[in-house]
Structure formats: structure tokens, C-alpha cells
Image: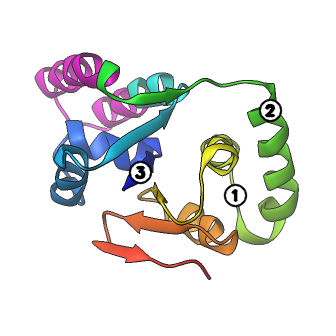
Amino acid sequence: MILFFDTSALIKYFHVEEGTEQVTTLINDPNHEVWILELTRIEFISALYRKYRAHIINNNQLKLAIEGFEAEYSAFHVELLNQAIAVEAEYLLKKYGKTEGLRTLDALHFAAFRLIAEKEDWYFVAADEVLCHTVQLEGFNVINPCRNSFQQPI
């Protein structure tokens, strides 16, 4: 199985929260190939600092999560952010921003996935209901670790 992780799901691998068990199982399965967008590196750190400022994690948890991510980063297949992804994200925002509430960073992740994925073998993994629903609308398989379910295309 080829899995493309959005930051909302990937962060669960490095910080224990709802969905961590399923994300850990997916990533640790040697039969799975894990892909992320280059943007995830920046978005991941930002999300952790947000959790720190909100007192959801302490300084030690923050440090461990960042160190863990940096140690694992090279094990992931990383899709570089490029002009084609930006153009695709703009298209997706125009198509789904008004009706589905698709947001900027989510559109970038989805755009990268849409450009590289083949529908049968690829799964988009996100812990964001709006994003999952939008990806399904485009005919892709989705895994939401918070719902502990595989969702077929709509």
C-alpha cells in the first residue's frame, strides 16, 4: 500500500494523541510506502509549537517529537514543492474552497498527492474531515486515523 500523509495525520506518529495507534501501525508496516510533501517539514514544526503554546505538550515532549521527526524524515519519500503543485492547489481551491472549505495548506498536500497518485494503490492519510471528504470527491481512497477507517471514493 502506498500512503501519502498530510501533516495532521503524520504528527500522530511523533506525539501520542487520538489516531496515534493506527498511524503507527500504518507507518511501521514494512509493506507500506510512506510519502509526504516537503512542506510537511515546516508545517510539522509549526503544529508542534502551536501545541506547546496551548500547553498540550511540554518542552520535553516538544523536543522529543522534533528529534523523532528529524531522525525519521529520511525514511519517507518526499515530494518536493514545485510550480505544478502550486498550480494544482489553486485549481483545487477554486473547485472546492467555496463549497467544501478546502484550505491553502491542505490544498497543497492534496495537489501533490493528486499529481503523483494512481487511484488503486494510493491512500491519502489525514486527520481532517474536510480534507478527507474533498479527496474522496476526487475519487481517491482515504484513511482517517481518528475514525480508524478506510474510506472509499465517493
Residue 70 shown in magenta: yes
Residue drawn at the location 73% of the way across and 24% of the way down? 82
What is the number of the mark on residue 2?
3
As rendered, which of 6 and 138 lies closer to the eye?
Answer: 138
Does the rendering let one see residue 140?
yes
Q: Earlier in the sequence, mark 3 or mark 2?
A: 3
What is the number of the mark on residue 84?
2
Quarter of the figure with the N terminus: bottom left
Residue 19 picture location, percent across and down: 24, 59
Residue 105 picture location, percent across and down: 63, 40
Helix, strand or loop status at disc 2:
helix
Helix, strand or loop status at disc 3:
strand
Decide if residue 127 is on the left or right side of residue 17: right
Which residue occupies the extreme left position in the image?
Answer: 60
Residues rendered magenta in the picture: 47-73
Residue drawn at the location 65% of the way across and 67% of the way down? 134
Determine which residue is flagged by label 1.
102
